[in-house]
């Protein structure tokens, strides 16, 4: 996936690879199927769940980086 930032829409990430869903779940973001949640950016969702968006961005980049290396 292209570079993920805090402004990347969650639905776009999940459409590329739903296998990254556990990274969201680990951070308390359990409403991944909700239409409004899928339209939120990482920053917006993290603000609602009191999470640091940079932590999730780092985890997602690592996840997709490992897939690119395979």
Image (cartoon, rainbow, N blue to C red):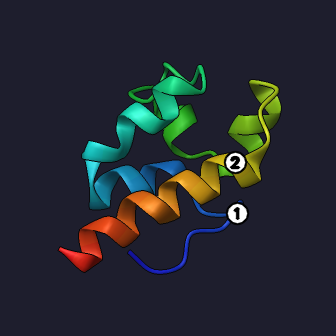
**Residue that mark 1 sits on:** 7
SS for dot 2? helix
Q: Nearer the viewer, mark 2 or mark 1?
A: 2
**33 or 13, which is in the foreground?**
13
Left or right: 14 in relation to 52:
left
Farthest residue in the left direction?
Answer: 70
Q: Is 1 displayed left or right of 17 in the figure?
A: right
Residue situated in front as seen by the camera: 62 or 6: 62
Q: Which one is in front, 42 or 34?
A: 42
For the point 62% across and 57% down, which residue is it? 57
Residue 43 visible to an observer of this rendering: no
Give residue 59's mark. Answer: none
- Left or right of 27? Residue 23 is left
The residue depicted at 38 percent of the width and 71 percent of the height is 65
Q: To which quarter of the image does residue 58 belong?
A: bottom right
Return the x and y of residue 7 as percentages of the image width and height.
70, 63
61 left or right of 1 in image: right
| Within-10-Å neighbours for mark 2: few <14, some 14–19, many 20+ | few
* Residue 68 image position (x, y, % from top left): 27, 77
> In the rendered image, is residue 18 in sight?
yes
Look at 74% across and 37% down and name the residue there.
46
Quadrant of the image containing the N terminus? bottom left
Q: Real-space Cα distance between discs 2 and 1?
A: 13 Å
Residue 5 percent location from the top left of the image: 66, 67
The vertical placement of 46 against 56, above or below, is: above
**Of the image marks 2 and 1, the number of the one nearer the N terminus:** 1
- Identify the residue under disc 2: 55
- Residue at 49% in and 19% down: 30
Asked which secondary structure carries label 1, the reply is loop
Q: Quadrant of the C terminus?
A: bottom left
């Amino acid at each position: 996936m292209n570079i993920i930032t805090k402004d990347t829409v969650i639905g776009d990430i999940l459409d590329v690879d739903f296998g990254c869903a556990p990274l969201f779940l680990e951070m308390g973001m359990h409403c991944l199927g909700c239409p409004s949640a899928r339209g939120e950016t990482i920053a917006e969702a993290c603000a609602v769940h009191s999470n640091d968006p940079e932590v999730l961005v780092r985890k997602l980049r690592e996840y997709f980086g490992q897939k690119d290396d395979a």
